[in-house]
Amino acid sequence: MEKIKCIVVDDEPIARQYLSDYVAKMPQLELLAVFSNAKDAWEIIETGGAELVFLDIQMPGLTGIEFIRTLQKKTAVILTTAYSEYALEGYELDVRDYLLKPISFERFARAVNKVADQLSIQADSISSDSSPSDENETITRDFIFVKSGYKSVKLNISDILYVEGMKEYVLIHTKDKKFAKLDRMKNMENLLKRQGFIRVHKSYLVSVKDIESVFGNTLEINGKQLPVGRSYKDEINKILGTNV
């Protein structure tokens, strides 16, 4: 398992110590360095050494907010502060999370796990972009592998109810779980159309066998109502033998 390289930037010795201790308890993290001011941390971030920064806001010389604005390299940042009034400004700067001191280990772990999932999805994106897909490839597998935390888990296609397109990834829904996969809806459609799936909307690809009802511009799967796009209606009626 590839560890996330991180640094701690905080002017308070106590905070630096307990954040370092928290990092040591997280198996997916590797602590590269600890800094008492933002200026000293700039080089290791800009040279790509650190993938995640635990950054205090109120520091002498250069605040955490000011520091983020100087960064040219897009690095994951989790803000750590005793001042809640900076939360909105931090999120406007696209920080990954905002931890209010005193920080419990449970809250710290939740933030780290969230960032780990996000970085994992980004890594999948780079991998998929570097391997061009053949949209005409004949798919014979009845399963796919999807990320779950730091594991790739086998998911039987027969267990998939529908796929929901998001901005940069897709959500694969089963009866009781959902999995994020960094992929395009078009690729998922090409993968699943030979496995009994049809596109019913620009954002939804559904398993025909799991459709429970169709009414108006809506269909229902597993008690969930999904929209039906106008341009997809004729194909749906043809496949299902309906007239909606």
Image (spheres, rainbow, N blue to C red):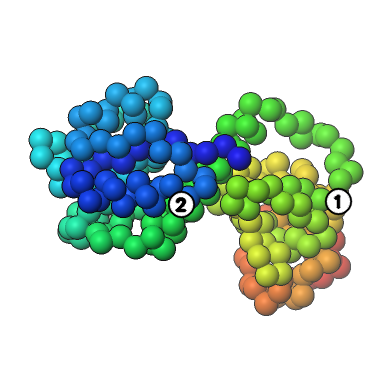
Q: Nearer the viewer, residue 40 or 76?
A: 40
Residue that protrudes farthest toward the right in the picture: 140
In the image, residue 129 above or below residue 194: above
Quadrant of the rendering where the N terminus is positioned: top right
Marker disc for residue 158 = none
Instruction: Please tell me which residue is depicted at 81% across the width and 34% down the height of the picture.
Output: 136
Classify mark 1: helix, strand or loop: loop
Q: Position of residue 115 (x, y in %)?
A: 46, 48
Q: Nearer the viewer, residue 4 or 115?
A: 4
Q: Nearer the viewer, residue 7 or 71?
A: 7
Whether residue 25 sits left or right of residue 45 in the image: it is: right
Q: Quadrant of residue 179?
A: bottom right
Instruction: Please tell me which residue is depicted at 55% across the width and 43% down the height of the picture.
Output: 120
Whether residue 133 sits left or right of residue 26 in the image: it is: right
Residue 48 in sight from this viewpoint = yes
Number of marks in the image?
Answer: 2
In the image, residue 234 above or below residue 15: below
Instruction: Please tell me which residue is depicted at 71% across the width and 69% down the height of the picture.
Output: 175
Q: Label 2 crowding class (10 Å Cα cut-off): few <14, some 14-19, many 20+?
A: few
Disc 2 or disc 1, which is closer to the eye?
A: 2
Whether residue 193 sits left or right of residue 105 in the image: it is: right
Mark before the other along the chain sequence, 2 or 1: 2
Q: Which residue is mark 2?
A: 25
Residue 204 in sight from this viewpoint = no
Q: Which residue is mark 1?
A: 142
